[in-house]
C-alpha cells in the first residue's frame, strides 16, 4: 500500500487526484532483478505509478540469461497504444529494445503521444559485453531514439558502443564520452528533419555511469547538461548484487522527473536511492548463485576452482566449501580454498591459495602434507623464489591490471608479470583485471611457465558464466 504522500504526487483541479506516471518500455527479467520488474519496483519506491510495455521476455536467474523471446513489433505497438491513448503518462523510460523495428515503433508512439520527458537507458550491451542488438539497431537507436531523449544514461560499455567502440578507462574519458554523446545528439538533430513540435525534445543531458571503472574505490558518474559537467561521487559498495542497478537508476530518474523534480536533482536522488538499495541488499542471497556459478564455470572449461570468501563467518565458509566440494568432485576438478588452511583441512579440499600476509607457505605445507596443492601470491622475483623454496606448487602473479575485486592492490602490469614468470621455477597463473578484452595480451607474453589466468569478475559478474568461461578459454588457447 502506498503512503498518503504518494497520492499527493500530482493532483488535478477537479478534486480527483492522480499519481505521477512513468511508462517503462523494456524487457522482462524472470529473476526479478532487472528490466521491467526493477523499473516497477523503483517507481513504487519513489511513490510513482508505473505502467509497462514489454518488448522482450527473458528467462534468467541469478546465474545468467538462459533465453530471450522478443515480442512482435506490432504487438509492442498495440501495448503502447493501449497505455498512451488512455493514460496520462508523464515520462517514458526505455530499456531493452531488441530490434530496429521496435525502436521505430516506439519513436512513432512518442511523436503521436508526446510526454513530458523521455529517459533512455541504452540497454545495448549486456554486462558480459555482448551487444544485445546488432549494428543496425545501434544506428536506429542513435538516429531515431536519442534525438527524442531528455536524458540518456549509458554505462561505460554502452557509451563506448555509442561512440564507435572507443576505450573509456578514466574519469576524463567519461567526461569526453558524455560531451561527445551530447554533441552527437545535437548533430543528428541538425541533420534529421524533426517536426517543429519536437524541437524541444532534443536530449540535453547525458549521464555516463562509472560503476564499471576499473581500479576506482568510488562510484563516479559524470553528468553533462550540455553546458556543465557534474561529477557525482558515491561510495563503492562491495557486493555482487548489482544486477539491475542501471534499470533502477534510470527508472528512479524517470519517477522523479514525473513528479516535477528538476533534472540534476532527479539524477542525484536516483543515485542516492541506488546506493541505499545496494547497501540494504549487499549480503542478500537469492537463488543458488554461487554453487550454480561454479558448475557453469566448470562446464565452460575452468580447470581449477578457488573458493574466496572474504566476509563469510567460519561456519558459512565451511558450508560453502562442502557444497562446492560436491560439485568439483563430481567433475573431477580440484577445489582450492583461499586463505583458510583450517577450512581446507577440515573439509579435505584439494589445497589452498595463500598470499604474502597469510600463513607462510612452508608452514602450510607442513600442515597440509605433500598431497595438497599450495598456491602463493607473488609480485616479485624474490617472492617467487621463496614460494618455490617453501614447497609451493604454483604462484599467482598480479594484480596485473586494475580491478575492483581487490582494493588497494598495486598492479604490476604485463612487464611485472613477465619478470616474475622468468624468475619463477614454478608454474604461474596471472590474476587481476583479466578478461576477454586483454587475456590475449597476457598469454602473448609467451613465457613457457605462464600456464593460464585466474579470474573473478570476468566470469562471475557476467550474465552467463558458462558462455563467458568458454569465450575466455577459447581466447586463452588460441595463440
Ligand atoms: C590464483 C590467485 N592468485 C592470487 C590471489 C591473491 O591472493 P592474496 O594475495 O592472498 O589475496 P586474497 O585473494 O586473499 O585477497 C588469489 N586469491 N588467487
Ligand atoms: C584476488 C586477487 N588478487 C590479485 S588481483 C585479485 C582479484 C582478481 O579479480 P578480477 O579477476 O575480478 O580482477
Ligand atoms: Mg589471501
Image (tube, rainbow, N blue to C red):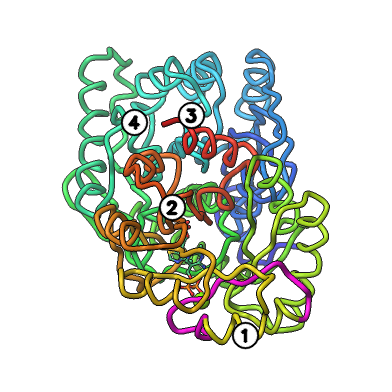
**Along the polypeptide, which appears first: circle 2 or circle 4?**
4
Badge 1 marks a residue whose secondary structure is: helix
| Residue pointed to by mark 3 | 131
Lower position in the chain sequence, tag 3 or tag 4: 3
Q: Is residue 116 visible?
A: no
Residue interval drawn in magenta: 346-361
Whether residue 475 is situated above or below residue 303 in the rendered picture = above
Q: Nearer the viewer, residue 42 or 171?
A: 171
Inter-mark Cα distance, 3 to 4: 11 Å
Q: Compared with residue 314, is residue 225 higher up or lower down, i.e. above or below?
A: above
Residue 432 vertical placement versus 37 (above, below) = below
Q: Position of residue 195 (x, y in %)?
A: 33, 15
Answer with mark 1 or mark 2, whichever residue precedes in sequence: 2
Mark 3 close to ligand 2, CB under 8 Å? no
Q: Which mark is residue 162?
A: 4
Mark 2 crowdedness (10 Å alpha carbons): few <14, some 14-19, many ≥20: some
Nearer to us in this view, 424 or 246: 424
Residue 66 seen by the camera: yes
Q: Nearer the viewer, mark 1 or mark 2?
A: 1
Label at residue 206? none
Amino acid at each position: 500500500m502506498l503512503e498518503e504522500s504518494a497520492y499527493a504526487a500530482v493532483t488535478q483541479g477537479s478534486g480527483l487526484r492522480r499519481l505521477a506516471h512513468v511508462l517503462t518500455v523494456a524487457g522482462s527479467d524472470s529473476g526479478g532483478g532487472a528490466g521491467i520488474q526493477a523499473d516497477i519496483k523503483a517507481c513504487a519506491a519513489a511513490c510513482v505509478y508505473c505502467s509497462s510495455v514489454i518488448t522482450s521476455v527473458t528467462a534468467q536467474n541469478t546465474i545468467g540469461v538462459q533465453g530471450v523471446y522478443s515480442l512482435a513489433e506490432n504487438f509492442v505497438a498495440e501495448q503502447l497504444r493501449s497505455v498512451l491513448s488512455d493514460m496520462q503518462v508523464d515520462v517514458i523510460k526505455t530499456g531493452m529494445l531488441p530490434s530496429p523495428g521496435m525502436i521505430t515503433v516506439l519513436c512513432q508512439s512518442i511523436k503521436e503521444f508526446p510526454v513530458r520527458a523521455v529517459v533512455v537507458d541504452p540497454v545495448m550491451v549486456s554486462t558480459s559485453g555482448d551487444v544485445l542488438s546488432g549494428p543496425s539497431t545501434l544506428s536506429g537507436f542513435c538516429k531515431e531514439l536519442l534525438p527524442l531523449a531528455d536524458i540518456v544514461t549509458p554505462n561505460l560499455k554502452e557509451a563506448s558502443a555509442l561512440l564507435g567502440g572507443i576505450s573509456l578507462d578514466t574519469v576524463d574519458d567519461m567526461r569526453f564520452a558524455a560531451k561527445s554523446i551530447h554533441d552527437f545528439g545535437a548533430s543528428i538533430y541538425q541533420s534529421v528533419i524533426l517536426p517543429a513540435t519536437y524541437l524541444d525534445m532534443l536530449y540535453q543531458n547525458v549521464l555516463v555511469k562509472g560503476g564499471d571503472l576499473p581500479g576506482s574505490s568510488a562510484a563516479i558518474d559524470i553528468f553533462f547538461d550540455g553546458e556543465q559537467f557534474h561529477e557525482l561521487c558515491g561510495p563503492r559498495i562491495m557486493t555482487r548484487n548489482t544486477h539491475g542497478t542501471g534499470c533502477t537508476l534510470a527508472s528512479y530518474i524517470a519517477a522523479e522527473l514525473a513528479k516535477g523534480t528538476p533534472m540534476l536533482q532527479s539524477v542525484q536522488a536516483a543515485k542516492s536511492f541506488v546506493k541505499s538499495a545496494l547497501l540494504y541488499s549487499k549480503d542478500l542471497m537469492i537463488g543458488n548463485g554461487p554453487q550454480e556459478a561454479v558448475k557453469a564455470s566448470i562446464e565452460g572449461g575452468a580447470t581449477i576452482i578457488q573458493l574466496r570468501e572474504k566476509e563469510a563467518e567460519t561456519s558459512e565458509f565451511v558450508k560453502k566449501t562442502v557444497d562446492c566440494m560436491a560439485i568439483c568432485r563430481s567433475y573431477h576438478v580440484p577445489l582450492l580454498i583461499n586463505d583458510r588452511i583450517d577450512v581446507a583441512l577440515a573439509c579435505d579440499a584439494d589445497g589452498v591459495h595463500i598470499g604474502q600476509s597469510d600463513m607462510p607457505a612452508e608452514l602450510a605445507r607442513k600442515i597440509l602434507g605433500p598431497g595438497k596443492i599450495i598456491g602463493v601470491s607473488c609480485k616479485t622475483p624474490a617472492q617467487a623464489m621463496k614460494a618455490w623454496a617453501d614447497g609451493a606448487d604454483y604462484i599467482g602473479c598480479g594484480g596485473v591490471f586494475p580491478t575492483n575485486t581487490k582494493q588497494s592492490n598495486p598492479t604490476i602490469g604485463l612487464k611485472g608479470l613477465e619478470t616474475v614468470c622468468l624468475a619463477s621455477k614454478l608454474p604461474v597463473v596471472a590474476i587481476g583485471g583479466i578478461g576477454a578484452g586483454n587475456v590475449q595480451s597476457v598469454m602473448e607474453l609467451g613465457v613457457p611457465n605462464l600456464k593460464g589466468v585466474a579470474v573473478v569478475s570476468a566470469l562471475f559478474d557476467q550474465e552467463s558464466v558458462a558462455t563467458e568461461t568458454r569465450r575466455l578459454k577459447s581466447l586463452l588457447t588460441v595463440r
